[in-house]
Image (cartoon, grey):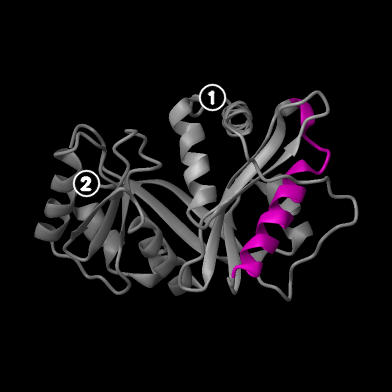
Amino acid sequence: MDIDVQRFAIANLRRRPVVAEVSGFVAGFDPGTTSPYLNYATPLPGASPADRDIAALVGAFRERGLTPRLEFAPDSAPAVEAALRRSGFTTEAVHQYLTCTPTTLTRPSDLHHVETPATDQEYAAIDGALAEAFSGEFAASPEGAARLRRTQENGGAVRFVRAPEGGCAGAATCSAPAVGTSELAGVGTRPAHRGRGVAASVTAALTEAMFARGARSVWLEYSGDGSRRVYERVGFRPGGTRLYMSLPPEV
């Protein structure tokens, strides 16, 4: 599965507003933000970069005032991690990912009604709810709401559960399928609505939507045992590992 996830990462980065292909790497940039989570690179499968290749990649980030950063499945390009470390890159995180296929998908009977946003107000409410869900890791903004709309309009999907008092209780997004798979990300529930099946509901709805669009699998990363249990309840199973590396500012 690692090779499918890595090929998806490449295809997804090539959808970014600005793309740079540098010495065996693909870097995707969003001029609307300096967030390292939206501006990063990934290697081509089997890449074996020399030091000069890493230097060229770093230059593509530095000239844009961005932190050089990569996300990739290390088993798909085993020589890359050592090359990055020689150039001063360090590990940010190692994340496990889970995958779901049409044969493993399970739809629990107690799921909430899930909606697709249609109005600017709904996209803004989703953006605000996700900002709250992730404890201010990013601020709600018109740009964030517009990014959600683009995801929905460009072949991906955004789904949310409406809060009883109005607005958004929780939501998630899924990238448009590529190379037979799709990434489900940003699953977030506002603190007041946690423990009620919101995350499972949007996860199941988005996974079904991607299968309906021809994806053979959907994958996601999880942040802890609690979230893993939520996803396993919907039919996600262990897939592999993704490595996050970046160059510290002083290098």
The image quarter in which residue 235 lies? bottom right
Q: Is residue 171 left or right of residue 239?
A: right
Report the residue marked by disc 1. Answer: 136
Report the residue marked by disc 2. Answer: 88
Q: Which residues are magenta?
A: 192-213
Q: How many marks?
A: 2
The quarter of the rendered structure image containing the C terminus is top left
Q: Alpha-carbon distance for marks 1 and 2?
A: 29 Å
17 relative to 106, above or below: above
Question: In the image, is residue 69 part of the stretch drawn in magenta?
Answer: no
Q: Is residue 59 left or right of residue 6?
A: left
The image shows residue 16 at horizontal and vertical percentages of 34, 51
The residue lying at 52 percent from left, 73 percent from top is: 180
Q: Identify which amino acid the numbered label 2 is placed on.
A: Gly
183 relative to 5, above or below: above
Q: Which mark is residue 176?
A: none
The residue lying at 53 percent from left, 24 percent from top is: 136
The residue lying at 46 percent from left, 39 percent from top is: 147
The nearer-to-camera label among 1 and 2 is 1
Which residue sits furthest right?
109
Per the image, label 2 sits on a secondary structure element best described as loop
Per the image, label 1 sits on a secondary structure element best described as loop
Crowd tier of the residue under label 1, counting other residues whose Cα lies within 10 Å: few below 14, some 14–19, many 20 or above: few
Report the front residue among 47 and 185: 185
Q: Identify which amino acid the numbered label 1 is placed on.
A: Gly
